[in-house]
Image: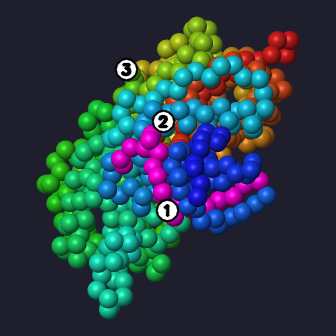
Amino acid sequence: MLELVPVSGYAAEGKALAKIDGKVIFIEGGVVPGDVVDVRLNKNKKDWAEGKAIHIHTYSPTRTEPFCEHFGTCGGCKWQMLPYAEQLKYKAQQVEDHLTRIGKMALPPIAPILGGERTRHYRNKLEFTFSNRAYLTQQEVNELPEEGGIPQRNALGFHIPRLFDKVLDINTCYLQDEPVNLIRNSIRAYALEHDLSFYDIRSQTGWLRNLVVRICTTGEVMVNLIIHHEDKAARTALLDYLLSVVPSITTLLYTINPKKNDTIYDLEPKVYHGKGYITEKLEDFTFKIGPKSFFQTNSYQGERLYQVTRDYAGLTGTETVYDLYCGTGSIGIFVSKLAKKIVGIELVKEAIDDAIENARNNGVQNAAFFAGDVIDICNDAFFAHHGAPDVIITDPPRAGMHEKLVQKLLEIAAPRIVYVSCNPATQARDLALLDAKYTVERIQPVDMFPHTHHIENVVLLQRRPNI
């Protein structure tokens, strides 16, 4: 029997922690610091162990009642049983732990974490999966007849963690605003009534595969239905039905995906209704979002994240800003009014095409965007033509920056670097390398994903004097 305590911030991949004789135990099972639980270990090393809570003797006084009926089974929103103020406390601790233990550098005081005003209905994008292998909860299994085994059922929802072929049928999801639940539930009901086949990931058969819904603060709604193969009559009937039930859909697309994987980056979504894209707004800037565009999935907190980034850049109107991993150009465009010039670089050409269009739509004339690898693009000839950077903004994926890119930044030696990260652990690793020429001046955690362990962090780096 263990009492769970907030060792190192209760933030290791969303697991609670306990400590016995110096050994840290990472515990799954919907528990929080202060709970007293029985744990079954599945890994037991010298200094640490992993396990799952199998019985809760007493609950922590900080625990709150989860609001979602799918809590504990669905892989998302694992921190619902923690009050939001407690979530923010542990997320801030996570940032401090990673930067001190991995980065091992001198740090200024960390600014208070910026929590979200919306803790529900904050995402602008969700992706659901069709499956003929629905995951049954223990209660549903117990209600089955004793004879006949466990039947296969159709489901439209989220994949169960670590069970690649099982999908939890979702009734109500609180991550995204309406009409997402109406869209999903209407499609499911129609598909079941008309005996449309749900995808079987094992045999690679079935018609309905995925459903992607995007909702903007502007009120525009995009739906992309992904199907395995063309069936014009069935497709037309389903999409017409959806538009009749949810007329607020402004753009409706379908994508045919006969591949073994679910990615659509190499496929061509086809417009069935509307203009084929939606428009999001951050401050006075508008951004075109297509079915394959990357955009911050929390527009409300995304705006605050970009405001912090702009503040940290310290622009006066004379600076050349390099925006690395620029995606569709959102950060560069957001800071463009205060810069002399924006140079955006991104590996994905389609994203650069969107960035160029976004700049044009916003009347931004001091920005140029380039597709390719920063390591290859940023050479002497490039700097001679576009100017060396006064400020570098980098917003890499969760894996952080490649070590060669970090060395390239040290070679460029811009006076300031603003590092935006969705993974403080890899950010801390990169900061440790940048410590050769830079000091950390400011740190600002921003919570983009309430009820999860994920946290964004913005760091301002200043080049050391005489370098």
Which of label 3 and label 1 is nearer to you?
A: 1
Q: Looking at the image, which residue is at 68% across and 35% down?
A: 97
In the picture, measured across the screen, residue 273 lies left or right of residue 383, that is left
Q: Nearer the viewer, residue 273 or 407?
A: 407
Would you call the spot at circle 3 few (<14 residues within 10 Å), some (14-19), or many (20 or more)? few
Name the residue carrying label 3. 284
Q: Which residue is mark 1?
A: 55
Q: Position of residue 312 (x, y in %)?
A: 59, 18
Q: What kind of residue is marked 3? A: Asp
Q: Is residue 337 above or below residue 425?
A: above
Quadrant position of residue 72: bottom left
Residue 249 disc label: none
Q: Is residue 62 magenta?
A: yes
| Corner quadrant of residue 5 | top right
Q: Earlier in the sequence, mark 2 or mark 3?
A: 2
Q: Residue 215, how many percent across, how many down?
A: 32, 42
Q: Is residue 229 above or below residue 407?
A: below
User: Is residue 362 magenta-colored?
Assistant: no
Q: Nearer the viewer, residue 147 or 257?
A: 147
Give the camera-side residue of 151 and 132: 151
The range drawn in magenta is 47-66
Residue 239 seen by the camera? no
List x then y, in percent, for residue 331.
Answer: 52, 27
Vertical position of residue 93 compared to residue 438: above or below: below
Dot 2 corresponds to which residue? 86
* Label 3 element class: loop
Q: What's the distance in space between the residues labelled 1 and 2, CA to CA?
A: 23 Å
Name the image quarter holding the C terminus.
top right
Please tell me which of labels 1 and 2 falls first in the chain: 1
